[in-house]
Image: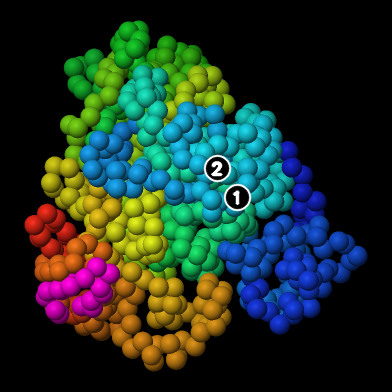
Amino acid sequence: MEAKSQLLFSTLFLSFVSLHANTLQTYVVHLHPHGVTSSSFTSKLHWHLSFIEQTLSSEEDPSSRLLYSYHSAMEGFAAQLTQSELESLQKLPDVIAIRPDRRLQVQTTYSYKFLGLSPTNGGAWYESQFGHGSIIGVLDTGIWPESPSFDDHGMPPVPKKWRGVCQEGQSFNSSNCNRKLIGARFFTKGHRVASTTMSPNIIQEYVSPRDSTGHGTHTSSTAAGTSVSMASVLGNAGGVARGMAPGAHIAVYKVCWFNGCYSSDILAAMDVAIRDGVDVLSLSLGGFPLPLFDDSIAIGSFRAMEHGISVVCAAGNNGPLQSSVANIAPWIATVGASTLDRRFPAIVRMADGGLLYGESMYPGNQFSKTEKELDLIYVTGGDGGSEFCLKGSLPIAEVRGKMVVCDRGVNGRAEKGQVVKEAGGAAMILANTEINLEEDSVDVHVLPATLVGFAESVRLKVYINSTRRARARIIFGGTVIGRSRAPAVAQFSARGPSLYTPTILKPDVIAPGVNIIAAWPQNLGPSSLPEDNRRVNFTVMSGTSMACPHVSGITALIRSAHPKWSPAAIKSAIMTTADGNDHFGKPIKDGNKPPAVFAIGAGHVNPERAINPGLIYDITPDEYVTHLCTLGYTESEIFTITHRNVSCHENLRMNRGFSLNYPSISVVFKHGKKSTMIRRRLTNVGSPNSIYSVKVTAPEDVEVRIKPQRLIFKYVNQSLIYRIWIISRKRMTKDRMSFAQGQLAWVHSGNSSLYRVRSPISVTWK
């Protein structure tokens, strides 16, 4: 999401007051899990408190400083400390690392059809029983439990392994949980002590698992919402709403509040979720990339992976900036965003006859008065931000009764419409700038409005500036499906290469994340604005936040069909079956150009193929540890992530030529290096007596050799190794980084099956 969500989080209110706010800061303290000092204490909690007690200079109760005591996601605690106390704590035995609390931000009636999922054929939904028995843990802003997407009609009983609770709180009690929503908790301590400023009480923030901002309700229903007939947004995009895994259970962990999501709260939620018994963790949140040993989500998810839990995260919305991709740990499935072939046309017809293509989910086709011709105005000049339609910037006398042009940026898209409405404007044209190009995230505006791309906005402004009395009307076209090329890469979707681990290609895949329609709470209008008094059960949102739960739901489907598969095996199935082409059979586009692997990773998710991939690249936790050694991490940094004592010198001596068995291939040539050899191990999960042949598309200026060229699997679960030699033929120039990409695929054509196990190849010269 862009400024819409940021504004919302900055205007919500939670009346917590923190003591010591001027002098104290929250830190996450990482302890040795088998610390020598722990044996002196009757419980881990008392052990954790002892560290705080040793650093306090006063008689203050150490428990008043403790926020969380962690045991599963990591060993350690979160506490409030002064600078001098921090320095004392760093000197104590068994303290491995101390990190300041970080603030992260949160980053569908049709998408299941677009992805090929159908309740009638013998495909992924049938084979997985719609995700039967899987539990998806969603870390987000909470949930609106009364939404029809969380009705438990037809749901099986709560799995016996479930150990979670339905935590009561403000406007939320245990009866709000059911066989669909089987658990709900909230984590507020990190946020509470960081949020000392009072925000205007515009929208009530519930101190409970109840969602007051809509984001968590939307993502939860995208992952596992039940079937809801006659779903629409004020008449637009009508149809049957379903999540990706409509038969799966949902457990909600509210970690995000009005000013964001704090790492201490996130870690606490992961810590509990591991013990609760979730199968999948879905995190539609993140920030900028961090080294793995400094990233709480990477550390907590390593522990989750060791417990057999798949962790799926949003790649972030800082695209198209290079190396902006976040959540880059190789044991995390990192998801970028793509478009659907569903459009909501709202055409601008200028008085000179010119047409500008725009899109909107304002229900204009239901109201005849919305299409009348109006005077156009684009207010510029001064320093009030009138071109962006900032609050209070539009002169009422100039804009009353007119169609106002507002540039994208600074404030939220829907908020601009509210500003126009308050100033007496009759309609709005939202104009993309050069940053947004042709990106088309639509909104359910509070007045007749449409969004036009950058090229169209240039034409519009030329018309306004060259015409004495510019006039236009908006023609609303409802919902149109199937006429546009899709999927394509979303402009905002974060891009690789990974800043800290370039030998792992990130994002892993892309999934629908633009104009996704999913469940919505009843305390908010569909625009998210506090002034919007319309009420709906569904609304539209865009972001990698929306793409992430698509993959979380697909992960639950695969887990239900293959309960013994590891998280790495499930991720491999999703990656090696992903599509490189759009639904027209042409390469997926990134704007006006073919996409780089740094935009799409292995490609666009295809759940129908992922449920039966033929072969998988599996990875053990020990192999991740060896991989961290190859990155040059120190042994203490590796211990911080993995809780394992490791001698990298000995580890690498025993694993000469090691390369992580990752489903994608990323090679970095630097310091004049010209060639490298990589090993990969494939495991047969398809048919016995299967023969696979390799097909290679080599990157430009690169030679790729593979031995053997055929893999003959005699039985199921058999593993075979192949080797790849990647040889650079490029003439290097100084001070210039360059990239090339290709792919390899292992193909098996049997009597009743065709398997194509595809891996992208990325080559970087530094």
Judge by depth and name the residue closer to the eye, 644 or 752: 752
Judge by depth and name the residue closer to the eye, 425 or 503: 503
Residue 354 can be seen, yes or no: yes
Q: Residue at x 40, y 19 (%)?
A: 234
Contact flag, marks 2 and 1 (Cβ < 8 Å): yes
39 to 465, vertically: above or below: below
Hey, which quadrant is residue 224 in on the image?
top left
Q: Residues within 10 Å of mark 2 (few under 14, many from 20)?
A: many
Residue 461 can be seen, yes or no: no
Q: Position of residue 436 (x, y in %)?
A: 34, 41
Quarter placement of the N terminus: top left
Residue range corresponding to the magenta coloring: 707-722
553 to 111, vertically: above or below: below
Judge by depth and name the residue closer to the eye, 71 or 28: 71
Query: What's under tag 2, amino acid-wise?
Result: Ile
Which labelled disc corresponds to residue 182?
2
Q: Position of residue 673 (x, y in %)?
A: 25, 84
Q: Position of residue 620 (x, y in %)?
A: 40, 73
Q: Residue at x 43, y 18 (%)?
A: 447
Q: Residues within 10 Å of mark 1 (few under 14, many from 20)?
A: some
Q: Residue at x 45, y 13 (%)?
A: 400
625 part of magenta stretch: no
Helix, strand or loop status at disc 2: strand
712 part of magenta stretch: yes
Quarter placement of the C terminus: bottom left
Query: What's under tag 1, amino acid-wise?
Result: Gly
Which labelled disc corresponds to residue 164?
1
